[in-house]
Image (cartoon, rainbow, N blue to C red):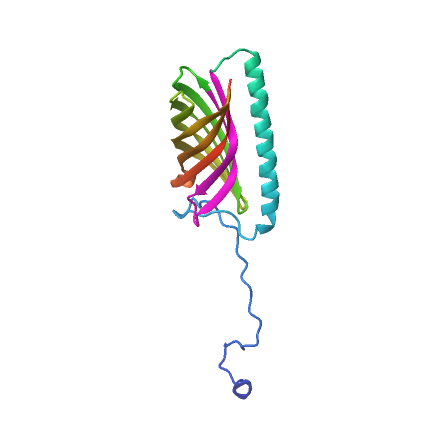
Amino acid sequence: MDSRRAENGRKPGRRSPHQTKRTRISQPAKWHDPEKTAKSIGANGRVSHSTAEEIFMVRKLSLLLGLVLLASISARAQGFGDKVEAFGGYSFMHADSSPTANLNGWELAGEYKFADWLGGVADFDGHYGNGSSLHTYLFGPQVSWPARVSPFAHVLIGGAHVSAGGFSDSAFATAIGGGIDTRLAPGIYWRIIQGDYLPTHFGGAREDNVRVSTGIVFHF
């Protein structure tokens, strides 16, 4: 036995440099593991789904903008005046996962005006990337300055749902932010920018997300 080892020219238990190395296969990471305090995102190796996600996002944006337009026509026909606003557009989210992720998606919001400067908002969005998806549904008050260029601010509360690599979770969410609208034509405004600090609480930990959106607002 010892002579064979000597002939091979290597110590017992030592691999030959010519032996094939095993390739490690990374396992899908979870957005958040409840058994640990670390946060994570999405599944690795999902690059092949990026094109499908982009097509899905474009289709949703088109559908949402169409729904906003139909809602505006219906509301005008029912004579709501300027009490209702509907917003639809593109949204970007910087997700405070581990590692952090930049997600693209859509946002749709409706507001009913109790006064020229005060309204109630229902806000929905979806963001996608790296094999993950994050949706929020938020409600709350919004104040604005009624003018051709109209700044606004809001505080919204509600929930969020994340799905990443076979893992999913729902949690409490809030949004604190505001933006600026400018009039393009009677009843039609461009939301130049809307920015929100949007914390979520998946698995008992807090994720300090940031959302930035732009799109079209219909007043009717």
Q: Is residue 26 left or right of residue 55?
A: left
Query: Is 123 left or right of 66, judged from the image as shown?
Result: left
The residue that appears at 41% across and 26% down in the rendered structure is 149
Q: Which residue range is magenta in the image?
A: 83-111
Closer to us: 9 or 218: 218
Q: In this view of the protein, can residue 53 be seen by the observer?
A: yes
Residue 133 visible in the snapshot: no
- Residue plotted at (44% across, 23% down): 121
What is the x, y in percent for residue 151? Answer: 39, 27
Magenta region includes residue 90: yes
Q: What secondary structure do most residues of the magenta stretch adopt? A: strand
Relative height, residue 181 to residue 52 (above, below): above
Quick check: is 149 in the magenta stretch?
Answer: no
- Using the rendered view, name the quadrant where residue 70 is placed: top right
Residue at x-position 43% and y-position 20%? 120
98, 191: nearer the viewer: 191
